[in-house]
Amino acid sequence: MRQSLKKTVLVFAAVFLAAIGSDSFAAIKKEPAGKKSMTVTATAYNSVKGQTDDDPWVAAWNNRLRPGDKIIAVSRDLEKHGLTNGAKVRIEGLPGTFTVRDRMNKRFKNRIDVWMEKDVRKARQWGKKKLKIIWHHDK
C-alpha cells in the first residue's frame, strides 16, 4: 500500500509540474523579444492650471503637448525600466500607442497618468484603474 501511495503522489506531482511548466513556458514564448509588460495604476491628468507647472502645454522634458497627441506621464520608478521620454506604450483597453512625454511627482510609484488635454470631466470619469501596459525595452 505504501509503494502504491508513493507512486500515486509522484505521478500526480509530475503531471502537476508538467502542466504548470508548460503554461509558464508558453507565456514566455508568446512574449516578443524586447517587450516588457506590467500592471500599473492608471489615472488621468489635464493641461489646466493646478495640475501642471507654469506652462500647462509643456511636459517635463520640454516637449510641447499638442491636441490629439496620445501622451502619458510615468512615475519616476518606471523610468529605470525604459519608460523614459519618447518611449512607446500600449495600454490595455485603449486604442493606439501612447508616448511617454511627462513624469509624475516623485511621491507616486508604479503609476501612469493618461493625458486628456483640457477635458477635466473626462479625466474624472476615467478615475483610477489597474491596467496592463506593454512597451519595448532595449536593455
Image (spheres, helix red, strand yellow):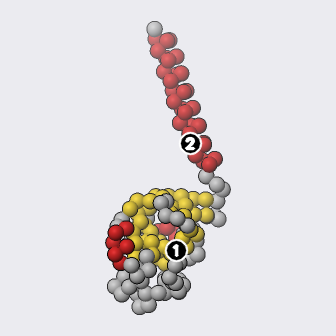
Q: Quadrant of residue 32?
A: bottom right
User: In the displayed structure, would residue 11 be above or below residue 51?
Assistant: above
Amino acid bearing label 1: Lys
Q: Which image quarter holds the C terminus?
A: bottom right
Instruction: Check the image and name the residue furthest to the bottom.
Output: 54
Q: Nearer the viewer, residue 88 or 28?
A: 88
x, y (%) of residue 45?
A: 40, 76
Number of numbered discs overlaid on the protein picture: 2
Q: Residue at x 50, y 82 (%)?
A: 67
Is any part of residue 118 visible from this angle?
Answer: yes
Q: Quadrant of residue 117?
A: bottom left
Amino acid bearing label 2: Ser
User: In the displayed structure, would residue 72 be above or below residue 128?
Assistant: below
Q: Residue at x 53, y 21 (%)?
A: 11
User: In the displayed structure, would residue 32 be above or below residue 89?
Assistant: above
Checking the image for residue 70, the label placed there is 1
Q: Nearer the viewer, residue 99 or 80?
A: 99
x, y (%) of residue 33?
A: 66, 56
Marks 2 and 1, Cα distance to the nearest angstrom?
Answer: 33 Å
The residue pinned by badge 2 equals 24
Instruction: Tell me the SS state at disc 2.
Output: helix
x, y (%) of residue 72?
A: 48, 73
